[in-house]
């Protein structure tokens, strides 16, 4: 534990403001900066339980950043807001003499540039361990089985976390080979979309979740007695508990990244080529382009034209309409 001869306690609102003023005075960024730091300190205290900056450790920092990632995914805050919080977090860490814990927003998919070659998909071994953990806990508490099915739908269909909870699973009919989503399922901006079912595991995921929901007398995967907000809080706290117990760094958005990568490869395969996205390969787009020209035998013009088609399809599956948004997922 680092000893600090300056304000560091976060136990009351006044003490938080005192710490924030001390941090801002050193960075000389004015009142607006102080407000962001106050908000960040309060969130850190509320979400991680930290009461003194002397006690900041890597696990608490990672936990707080994952909270921000989840809030972006749940559309509670904008990516730019999360990026500003991370900037404030880094100033806090500098003040706490823990520069070794500084965080890159880019590594968590929160860069304002919205593109980088980092693979932000959840590790599949960790993701599988979480689903098994939920199943084990679900033997005694059915709430965890709701989360198990939601988590599976996130990976199989790229659903946002809130969509995977609110989806009206009991009435879903996939005989047409598509999962149809709309306003009742809490899609972003109430925008309808259809996700093609191309794998047996997708059909099984819907059938299993539907059977579970019906058996519990639920229309969605939100248990009776919970509002969407309350259930999202429970889900986020459950994931947080798992990460604490295991030391893993899973988040909700990582399942959408995984789906995007898998769908990207699938669409390219339909075009007769085995192609991974830049993010999954961990390379810059320019390097990816040169590599894929050799791998596919395509000229640059044809390669980019086909990739634009693939990216647009992935974007639509994720509930977007712009190719540019796929930079966040695919690199």
Image: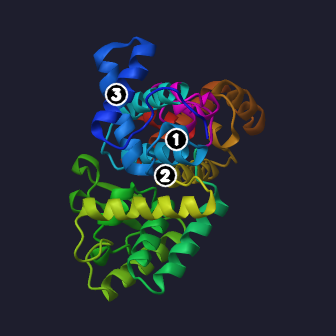
Which of labels 2 and 3 is toward the front? 3
Gap in Å between the C-alphas at discs 3 and 1? 39 Å
Q: Position of residue 164 (x, y in %)?
A: 37, 63
Q: Check disc 1 and report its element: helix, strand or loop.
A: helix
The N terminus - image quarter: top right
Q: Position of residue 240 (x, y in %)?
A: 48, 58
Colour mode? rainbow
Q: Is residue 75 left or right of residue 137?
A: left
Quadrant position of residue 4: top right
Q: Position of residue 22 (x, y in %)?
A: 40, 21
Q: Indicate whether 88 appears above or below 31.
A: below
Gap in Å between the C-alphas at discs 2 and 1? 8 Å
Residue at point 47%, 26% (across, down): 6
Q: Are marks 2 and 1 in contact (CB under 8 Å)?
A: yes
Q: Check disc 3 and report its element: helix, strand or loop.
A: helix
Q: Are marks 3 and 1 in contact (CB under 8 Å)?
A: no
Whether residue 34 is visible? yes
Q: Which residue is mark 2?
A: 256
Residue at point 37%, 70% (across, down): 176
- The majority secondary structure of the magenta stretch comes to loop
Q: Which residue is mark 3?
A: 18
């Amino acid at each position: 534990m680092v000893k600090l001869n300056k304000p560091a306690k976060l136990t009351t609102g006044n003490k938080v403001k005192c710490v924030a003023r001390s941090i801002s005075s050193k960075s000389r960024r004015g009142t607006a900066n102080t407000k962001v730091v106050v908000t960040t300190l309060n969130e850190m205290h509320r979400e991680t339980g930290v009461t003194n900056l002397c006690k900041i450790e890597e696990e608490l920092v990672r936990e707080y950043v994952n909270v921000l990632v989840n809030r972006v995914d749940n559309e509670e805050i904008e990516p730019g807001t999360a990026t500003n919080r991370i900037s404030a977090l880094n100033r806090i860490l500098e003040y706490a003499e823990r520069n070794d814990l500084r965080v890159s927003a880019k590594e968590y998919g929160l860069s304002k540039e919205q593109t980088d070659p980092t693979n932000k998909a959840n590790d599949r071994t960790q993701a599988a361990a979480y689903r098994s953990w939920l199943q084990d806990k679900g033997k005694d508490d059915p709430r965890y089985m709701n989360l198990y099915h939601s988590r599976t739908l996130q990976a199989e269909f790229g659903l946002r976390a809130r969509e995977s909870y609110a989806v009206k699973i009991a009435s879903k009919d996939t005989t047409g080979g598509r999962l149809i989503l709309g306003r009742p399922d809490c899609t972003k901006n109430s925008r309808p979309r259809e996700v093609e079912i191309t794998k047996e595991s997708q059909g099984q995921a819907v059938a299993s979740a539907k059977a579970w929901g019906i058996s519990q007398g639920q229309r969605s995967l939100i248990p009776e007695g919970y509002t969407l907000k309350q259930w999202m809080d429970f889900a986020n706290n459950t994931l947080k508990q798992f990460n604490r117990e295991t030391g893993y760094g899973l988040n909700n958005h990582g399942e959408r990244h995984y789906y995007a990568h898998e769908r990207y490869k699938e669409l390219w395969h339909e075009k007769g080529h085995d192609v991974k996205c830049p993010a999954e390969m961990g390379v810059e787009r320019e390097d990816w382009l040169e590599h894929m020209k050799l791998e596919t035998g395509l000229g640059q013009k044809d390669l980019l034209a086909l990739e634009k088609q693939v990216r647009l399809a992935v974007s639509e599956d994720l509930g977007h309409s712009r190719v540019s948004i796929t930079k966040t997922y695919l690199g």
